[in-house]
Amino acid sequence: MLNRRTWLLTAAALPLLPAVPAFAAEATPETVRAAMAKATRFMTDKVAVGGGYVWSYLADFSRRWGEMEAYPSMIWTQAPGTPEMGQTFLDAWHATGDEMYYAAAESTAAALIAGQHPSGGWNYIIDTAGEESLKRWYETIGRNGWRLEEFQHYYGNATFDDHATVECGRFLLRLHLEEGDPKYRAATDKAVDFILESQYPNGGWPQRYPRMGAFSNHGRPDYTGFITLNDEVAEENISFLLLVLQQLKDERVRAPVVKAMELILALQQPAPTPGWAMQYTLDLKPSGARTYEPAAITPHGTAAAIGQLLDYYGQTGERKYLARIPEAIDWLASVEIPADKRPASGLNFYRNYEPGTARLIGTHRRGSNAQNGEYWSDFNTSDTRAEKRVDVPALRARFDRTAALSTEAATAASVLMGRAPSLLPRYVVTRAVGGSDLNITAARTQSANDAAVLIGELNTEGYWPLELRTTSHPYRGDGPPAPPPGFVDRGQVGDEWDTSPFTEPTGPIGISTGLYINNMSRLIGYLEAHK
């Protein structure tokens, strides 16, 4: 009997692909496949480092960046990085049957497995040159990123932040399910063990694990052991464990999922701030994290938690998950910036409110680099700007629709109850891909004209060029102990010793992993629509 992969190759056997034209007046499946193959060969042959990727590269590869500037030996696990590339390769393999894409996905998986922490999770960065090279990066570039405090200290462990661990685990799980390869199951099981072992008895997760001893980060207390909701830590861990329950029938994860769901209820604060913080101490009190993140109730975090509780009602049918949502929505409405006072961007919320009083908290900074600079918070909000957007009417409407559902209707697609359809569709639309140069959501192009434009934009070298407006100061040593004369703080970045990324009005043309993911997804959509 033919396995799934052999069947795909047999059913979708392709003729030799034509060369990609410099301009295609109208796309055809053949020219789309050719463009996809050319772009992929460039990424795998010219860009990849041991099968892995960062976010962007100068065209001559003289500099490259993930969230910060990277060494040539590094790959990144944060989106749009290595695991998202692996997902894209698998999507392309399903769309075309071309074995090249499956081989590319396996190469990506090998890079992630090689960089998997012994505990089972992943750090933001994998350095193929080894541990000493990674430590040197943290002691130089990382240490001097004033704004990016999470990179100023080498922890030597793994992180849930920015979905780093979960995205790697999700890709490896999918690759295992394609053909049942045991090495991908072993890596997936190791990631599941990491998530289960790192969960606190109360159901929460730290930002980083395992704990590597008590220490301070640049003289500041270590916050990475606090219960973390920031960057969807709990939400993504629950989502991944539900996927494991559904696809692998691993019953170990059921009780931890329920415990984590119930913790979200316990973390909601009382009036007058019935929302959620981004992180909590182990006794469930709101806590600060990085020095510009005070202990605060956040509107965007509250909106995210409301969405989670609505999802959990859909998993369980238990109305306790809906009980306090109305007061949280009412609080959001009470602190929303009036329409006539919003910036042109439409952002309608400030970031931080004091637990128990609902006073707006202002955060400020002084200095010019990681050595002499500092952040602090108080109630002076004269320079506080809107930072977030939340659609409160849409959130309230979703609650009303969900609350009106019976238990049976609400749980029709419950993984916990074994009713959900597959969470691994044949084609996976990649989640939003980020990076300051590219903040777009992968879309499915079905129009031949749209596909023709993408084909025409692919350059002769084989990549889609993008103006890289986000850059950083090259590392030049630790900064001076006082700001240079005449220094003016731009906000995003400090003086020339600050290695934090910042955005300029213009920049050089370069290579973007996120743009490859986006454009490949659109071309895959075209092929899907024209089968």
Image: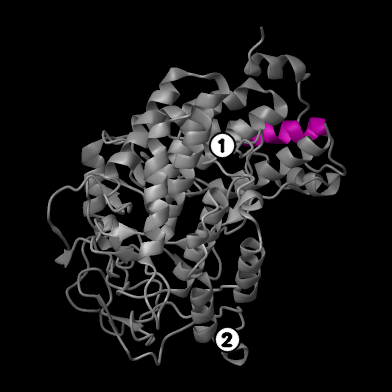
For the residue pair 283 and 75, the one nearer the viewer reads as 283
Residue 531 drawn above or below residue 153: above
- Counting other residues with Cα less than 10 Å from the Cα at mark 2, is it few (<14), some (14-19), or many (20 or more)? some
Magenta stretch bounds: 29-39
Give the image location of residue 67, x and y in percent. 41, 55
Residue located 37% across and 53% down the image? 161
Let me know if residue 13 appears in the view: no
17 in magenta:
no
Residue position for label 2 = 342
Q: Secondary structure at mark 1?
A: loop
State the image quarter where residue 38 is shown: top right
Q: Main secondary structure of the magenta part?
A: helix
Residue located 67% across and 46% down the image? 519
Report the side of 421 relative to 445 (left or right).
Answer: left
Residue position for label 1 = 418
Residue located 54% across and 86% down the image? 337
**Quadrant containing the N terminus in the rendered view:** top right
Q: Secondary structure at mark 2?
A: loop
Residue 82 drawn above or below residue 282: above
Report the side of 74 relative to 152 (left or right).
Answer: right
The tally of labels here is 2
Give the image location of residue 376, x and y in percent. 26, 80
First in sequence, mark 2 or 1: give its number. Answer: 2
30 in magenta:
yes
The amino acid type, in three-letter code, at marker 2 is Arg
State the image quarter where residue 529 is shown: top right
Residue 400 drawn above or below residue 46: below
For the residue pair 41 and 166, the one nearer the viewer reads as 166
Residue located 74% across and 41% down the image? 525
